[in-house]
Amino acid sequence: MIAVHTAQQVREAEQAFFAANPGVDLMQRAADGLAEAVENFLEGRGPGVDGARLLVAVGPGNNGGDALFAAARLARLGCRVELWATHGDAHEAGLAEAQAAGCQQIDAGQATTALAEADLLLDGVLGIGGRPGLDAPVATLAREARDLGIPVVAVDLPSGLDADSSTPAEESFHATLTVTFGALKPCHVLQPAASRCGEVRLVDIGLELGEPWALAAAPGDIAQRWPLPGPTSDKYSRGVVGIDTGSVHYPGAAVLGTVGALHAGAGMIRFCGPGPADGLIRAALPSVTHGEGRVQAWLVGSGWGDEPGDAERLAGRLADGLPTVVDADALRLLPDHLPAGCLLTPHAGELARLLDVEREEVTADPIGHARAAADRWQAVVLLKGATQYVVQPDGAVWLAVPGPHWSAQAGSGDVLAGICATLLAAGLDAARAALLGASVQAMAARRRPGPYPPDDIAREVPAVVGGFEVVR
Ligand SMILES: NC(=O)C1=CN([C@@H]2O[C@H](COP(=O)(O)OP(=O)(O)OC[C@H]3O[C@@H](n4cnc5c(N)ncnc54)[C@H](O)[C@@H]3O)[C@@H](O)[C@H]2O)[C@@H](O)CC1
Ligand SMILES: Nc1ncnc2c1ncn2[C@@H]1O[C@H](COP(=O)(O)OP(=O)(O)O)[C@@H](O)[C@H]1O
Ligand SMILES: [K+]
């Protein structure tokens, strides 16, 4: 799992570092890592370092300092470097060093001309001290770089973003590569802000960071944690999933959830939903059994619509006291108390309705709202979207492996709920079931980029899970 820390946590670690190591200049470590990353970038994608033309946009703070010391190193390696101090002031020692290395200082007007000839724009305008958004001349440069297709390497984060937020300001740089120091910050991993960062490279500058703000999963984390069958496994020990989903109007949701549960490796599925879906599932999925019986976890809510008796339908399933995936329409009917180990799977609109707030409030502070719901219902919340947040009642946050944006389609959530129900039935706690379920669906979708229907993506899940056995 990759640790993510807030700007404040990084600042505190920096202060602790300075107190313990008074003689060490962290900016030089950052500049070393940055210069090396730019060198690799130029070697890998461009003209190489010698003779490469760099435009360096330098802000008033330490982010500009990092950029200036890195620019000096790159100039000494043969780059032709032009510097634009975007706010007049620039880090004094850094500027002196860059000028001594042969970097040329230019003004705003000259920056536009320099940009057109540049192999790369180094964005050292603002870092973790930046307020979101850009002043007009800098915003113009950022826009021109996009229009001209000039690659941007961002120092720490693309200027204009708020380090701690998922929501990007309207104006910011769009980086091809972001070189960050000490720790990943929220903007590097949370969509849509993360899409402004490009590839993110972390430079270790020796900071000792405490408890992370969140942990982000990588594919290898999912491979290590996925429950695999062994020699003593049978269908019951692998987990029996009870599915009570679908309705007269929405039978497809029940089929999709059942397809998801089956392809994630359920030991057995008992489908207990109403008529039309029951018939479809009998025809399409012969291994699914029908009717009541012992199960280890329930899946409810997908495709229920809004029918009289839904509250009783939910109460009946929760009365078993089993871990339950509560999805979609059942989220509107939540009682005050849920059995231990439940998983709620709202998207932003459903979470807003659950908390009686506007959808925009949830998208502005997804984690705050997911935490509020997790605390109120003492259940794990999987907040779905381009970033999938797994939030526990104690406030801990995990981020699932991200998937392609093609997944934003009706039915993906139904499949996901089915996958999570299989993992709950296999005995995983709700947080692990959510993290693994959301991640494996994303990994399956990555294998098949393009607009495939959600059931086709579910059919890729076995190949992903099969690969976990090889890894382990
Ligand atoms: N904290 C750390 O551990 C380290 C920080 N380093 C660098 O230092 C950076 C943080 O430096 P600073 O705290 O000086 O902050 P920044 O360099 O991000 O910017 C602060 C300055 O910009 C001004 N400013 C903020 N938002 C603005 C806006 N929207 N438009 C115009 N001006 C704006 C502020 O008034 C302040 O003068 C990091 O991002 C990183 O690049 C590295 O040198 C290594 C270690
Ligand atoms: N922009 C996006 N990029 C990647 N995945 C997304 C994006 N938007 C939504 N998703 C994923 O697609 C699925 C959609 O779920 P949901 O909205 O509940 O669909 P439905 O209820 O119609 O099945 C979720 O797994 C969600 O995380
Ligand atoms: K920057």
Image (spheres, rainbow, N blue to C red):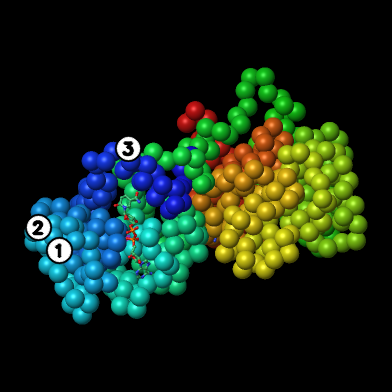
Earlier residue among tags 2 and 1: 1
- The residue wearing badge 3 is 20
Amino acid at pointer 2: Ala
* Spatial separation of the CA atoms under disc 3 and disc 1: 35 Å
Ligand 3: quadrant of the figure = bottom left
The image shows residue 32 at horizontal and vertical percentages of 22, 47
Query: Image height check: is 169 above or below 262?
Result: below
- The residue wearing badge 2 is 101
Earlier residue among tags 3 and 2: 3
The image quarter containing residue 252 is bottom right
The image shows residue 92 at horizontal and vertical percentages of 19, 61
| Label 3: how many Cα within 10 Å (few below 14, some 14–19, many 20+) | few
Query: Helix, strand, or loop for circle 1?
Result: strand
Query: Helix, strand, or loop for circle 3?
Result: helix
Work out whether residue 271 or residue 63 is closer to the camera in this orientation and state it.
63
Residue 278 visible, this orientation? no
The image shows residue 141 at horizontal and vertical percentages of 29, 74
- The residue wearing badge 1 is 81
Query: Helix, strand, or loop for circle 2?
Result: loop
Position of 95 compared to 375: left or right? left
Circles 2 and 1, Cβ within 8 Å, touching? The answer is yes
* Spatial separation of the CA atoms under disc 2 and disc 1: 9 Å
The image quarter containing residue 162 is bottom left
